[in-house]
Amino acid sequence: MNQEEKKYPLPPFTIESAIEKVQKAEDAWNSKDPVSVSKAYTIDSEWRNRTQFINGREEIVLFLTEKWNKERNYKLKKELWGFRENRMAVRFEYEYQGKNDQWYRAYGNELWEFNENGLMQKRFASINDLKIDESERKLI
């Protein structure tokens, strides 16, 4: 996908198109396909993920590949918290199995900014992890 292609829905967002955009992001991340996920972002997309700074699709693919190799049985749920024009605030939680089969639930917020073609050009994520027992899983 080059920079001229479009990723619908496009900004400025309505409540319906914002909810659709969030659902598409959730579905993409739950696919655990780093290359496919990266195509929703601009070639020079800027990320802050926890304490990591990631720039561009190539780094996104590397980051997601490593992430999903470490975070087994990953399952994500996203929820729109707010939007305006080409920006969104999203709350999320996901569960995964880490080293020694320990389960975790991660909670966080993301701030998204899209270009006119509907590609995300900025993603800033704040995330906290909580150890849980397998019996406490909600996202099955």
Image (cartoon, grey):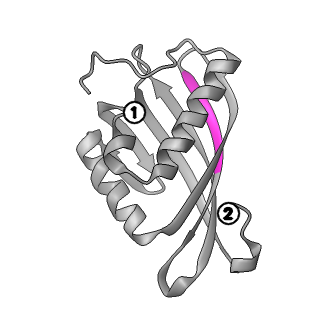
Residue at mark 2 to residue at mark 1: CA–CA distance:
25 Å
User: Height in image: 77 above or below 43?
Assistant: below
Verify CB contact (< 8 Å) between mark 2 and mark 1: no
Q: Position of residue 108 (x, y in %)?
A: 62, 52
Q: Amino acid at mark 1?
A: Ala
Secondary structure, mark 2, is: loop
- Badge number at residue 40: 1
| Magenta stretch: includes residue 24 | no
In the rendered structure, the answer to whether residue 97 lies left or right of residue 137 reads left
Q: Single out the mark in the foreground, 2 or 1.
A: 2
Mark 2, other Cα within 10 Å: few <14 / some 14–19 / many ≥20? few
**Residue drawn at point x = 23 percent, y = 45 percent:** 58
Residue 99 numbered mark, or none: none
Q: Position of residue 65 (x, y in %)?
A: 33, 59
**Relative depth, front residue between 27 and 47:** 27
Q: Which residue is mark 2?
A: 140
Q: Is residue 81 left or right of residue 55?
A: right
Q: Is residue 43 above or below residue 66?
A: above
State which region is magenta.
Answer: 87-92
Asked whether 28 or 123 is in front, the reply is: 28
Q: Is residue 75 above or below residue 116?
A: below
Q: Nearer the viewer, residue 92 or 110?
A: 92
Front-lying residue, 26 or 89: 26
Q: Earlier in the sequence, mark 2 or mark 1?
A: 1
Kind of residue sitting beneath label 2: Ile
Picture coordinates of residue 106 (x, y %)? 62, 62
> Which of the 4 image quarters holds residue 94?
bottom right
